[in-house]
């Protein structure tokens, strides 16, 4: 029987060793994954180059798969389907359109193609092969694929999280859709660009599972109960500070619904939750909160505090007019509690009022 030590330093010593072992195991897995992805890159490149320079046909891929399986019977990944994925993997990431997109994001339009290809190779090497296969299967647009590649590498998304982000349109909400804020006039140029990147046009809160009318406090309660999912939706860099965060001014108290700190912006980010549509007076309240945060909570080396008003719906013109006179950086975004109706169905399905009228007409008249 193993004798248990009672030394007071032992629990801390054991905890430190466990953490070190977990770190080493994670590092080993990442190293193995990197080498595997680079191997698949090289196999895909070899197939493409031989087909382009030596005129090899598609039959060579089938033969190569069989020969590799025979040579390495204990290794997985050399199926015919996977070899075709390797070929597609290299070809799609060496495509001129994709490399041009990389150059645009690097702000280096005249960059050498070999240099760009090497940058892409390093990027994809940091992402597991299972993620790569999902990206290849679902994404064809170079800008969209590059966004999810970079986000997966940066945020450490699991395969399921990546698929959920694709289904939820994270690219469209973070990049493509118009965002409503006054960041360019309220912040220095470099910080305004970072703040714009931090904010989404629309936040997907379907994970809350809300199927009926709720109060603002109920919405806040659910967000806190699912804080990890909410932070994942907000994006990388958000650190939770508190809910109903108290701000005092004289004898009065004011409370910010949700307060976060963004590690890369180095700024407090206040969220105000609204169940209904945006109203112009919401910006005045947020402007007041930001003044208090900057005066009472902002550290000497922090950037100006930022406010985001989350509402059920908004009118962009109304938001623009409401923000014109505000000196503090404020953004207004919608949240989504239920799956959105696909664009092709809009205008073709009856509204709730039309359905109610139809049901009313179908009922027999009262006697």
Image: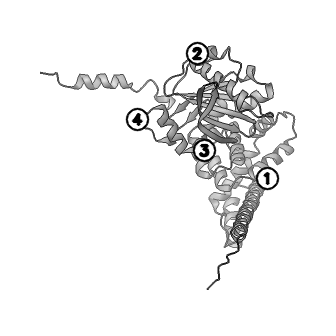
Q: Could you classify mark 2 by the number of other residues whose Cα lies within 10 Å: few (under 14), some (14-19), or many (20 or more)? A: few
Depth check: 99 or 175 in front? 175
Q: Residue at x 64, y 63 (%)?
A: 79
Q: Are marks 2 and 4 in contact (CB under 8 Å)?
A: no
Q: Is residue 132 above or below residue 337?
A: below
The residue where tag 2 is placed is 318
The residue where tag 4 is placed is 212
Depth check: 347 or 152 in front? 152
The residue where tag 1 is placed is 49
- With 191 as the anchor, is 333 left or right in this view? left
Between circles 1 and 3, the one closer to the viewer is 3
Q: Are marks 1 and 2 in contact (CB under 8 Å)?
A: no
**Residue 175 point in image, percent of width and height:** 67, 32
Q: Secondary structure at mark 1?
A: helix
Q: Quadrant of the C terminus?
A: top left
Mark 2–mark 4 distance (CA, rounded to whole Å) = 28 Å
Quadrant of residue 70 in the image?
bottom right
Give the residue furthest to the front.
251
- With 353 as the anchor, is 35 left or right in this view? right
Depth check: 160 or 17 in front? 17
């Amino acid at each position: 029987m193993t004798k248990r030590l009672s030394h007071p330093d032992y629990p801390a010593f054991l905890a430190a060793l466990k953490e070190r072992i977990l770190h080493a195991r994670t590092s080993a897995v990442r190293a193995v994954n990197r080498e595997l992805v680079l191997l698949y890159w090289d196999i895909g490149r070899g197939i493409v180059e031989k087909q382009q320079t030596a005129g090899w046909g598609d039959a060579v891929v089938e033969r190569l798969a069989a020969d590799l399986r025979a040579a390495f019977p204990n290794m997985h990944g050399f199926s015919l389907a996977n070899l075709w994925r390797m070929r597609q993997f290299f070809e799609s990431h060496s495509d001129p359109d994709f490399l041009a997109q990389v150059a645009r994001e690097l702000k280096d339009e005249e960059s050498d193609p070999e240099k760009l290809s090497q940058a892409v190779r390093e990027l994809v090497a940091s992402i597991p092969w299972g993620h790569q296969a999902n990206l290849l299967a679902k994404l064809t647009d170079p800008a969209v694929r590059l966004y999810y590649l970079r986000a997966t590498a940066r945020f450490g998304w699991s395969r399921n999280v990546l698929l959920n982000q694709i289904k939820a349109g994270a690219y469209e909400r973070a990049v493509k859709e118009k965002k409503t804020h006054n960041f360019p006039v309220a912040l220095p140029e470099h910080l305004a660009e970072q703040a714009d990147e931090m904010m989404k046009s629309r936040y997907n809160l379907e994970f809350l599972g809300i199927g009926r009318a709720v109060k603002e406090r109920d919405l806040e309660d659910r967000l806190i109960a699912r804080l990890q999912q909410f932070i994942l939706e907000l994006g990388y860099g958000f650190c939770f500070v508190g809910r109903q965060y108290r701000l005092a001014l004289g004898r009065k108290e004011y409370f910010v619904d949700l307060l976060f700190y963004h590690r890369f912006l180095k700024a407090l980010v206040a969220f105000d939750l609204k169940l209904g549509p945006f109203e112009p007076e919401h910006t005045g309240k947020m402007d007041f909160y930001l003044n208090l945060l900057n005066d009472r909570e902002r550290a000497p080396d922090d950037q100006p505090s930022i406010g985001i008003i989350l509402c059920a719906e908004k009118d962009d013109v109304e938001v623009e007019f409401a923000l014109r006179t505000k000196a503090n950086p404020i953004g207004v975004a919608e949240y989504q509690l239920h799956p959105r109706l696909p664009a092709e169905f809009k205008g073709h399905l009856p509204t709730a009022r039309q359905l109610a009228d139809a049901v009313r007409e179908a009922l027999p008249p009262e006697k």
